[in-house]
Amino acid sequence: MRAFDTQRHEICRVGRSLFERGHVHASAGNISVRLPNGAGFLITPTDACLGFLQPDQLAHTDARGQSLGGARASKTLALHRAIYAAEPDAQCVLHTHSTELVALSLAGVASAEAVLPPITPYFVMKVGRVPLIPYHRPGDPAVATLVTAAIEAARTRGAPIRAVMLDRLGPNVWHESPAAAMAVLEELEETARLWRMTEPKPEPLTDARIDELRSAFGARW
């Protein structure tokens, strides 16, 4: 099977897994991949349910976002393209309306710089800081500028990010593959659940413990 077809099937597999486990619902959420050798992008169609995707249904666009085949691309394509441009290592971008994370943004995040504090080692190791992007309507092109700025600021700080939280809409995460991006999303959602269900709120890991995770595992915080 050609790499192009493999990517199509992997997007569908990950979309179905997210849907079946309740991380996405109805037509909320989208997944894209960057194709090799400048062949553009694959992205889920607008208003598609991620649980019932078909490989030949996915939108194929060129590097500028112009359609090359398939259904009409998700309206978030501009944001995905901005993330790929700002983060060369990103090969997949995934967006969900995950319940715990949206609820966190409604109730109030820990801070605009990091929506969740570093309460578990695996959150620090696998996810890292997740900045909050202020609310804009779905598909607003201004969001791409804000996310790009957040990626660049994190890189300047020496701790690149793998995710942002769109206020009232949910997270955007990116990684080297759909499976890797899904793993980041799962750890992020689970940490939000732990934070919201725990009273009194747990103390964050100390700076010394975070430094230990940086040294031992290359954690980015």
Image: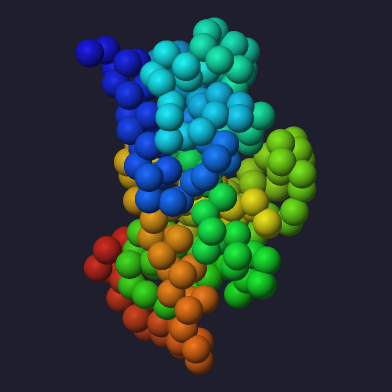
x 35%, y 42%: residue: 17
Write down the quadrant of residue 131 in the picture: bottom right
Of all residues shown, which one is farthest toward the top? 68
Q: Is residue 179 above or below residue 165?
A: above
Mark yes or no: residue 203 visible.
yes
x 52%, y 8%: residue: 69
Q: Is residue 138 above or below residue 77?
A: below
User: Which sits in the foreground, 136 or 26?
Assistant: 26
Write down the quadrant of residue 91 in the picture: top left
Q: Is residue 126 above or below residue 33?
A: below
Where the N terminus falls, by quadrant? top left
Q: Is residue 118 above or below residue 46?
A: below
> Residue 205 at what x, y percent from top left?
41, 82
Question: What scheme was used to colour the molecule?
Answer: rainbow
x 61%, y 17%: residue: 72
User: Which sits in the foreground, 132 or 47?
Assistant: 47
> Residue 54 at what x, y percent from top left?
41, 21
Where the C terminus falls, by quadrant? bottom left
Mark yes or no: residue 155 visible.
no
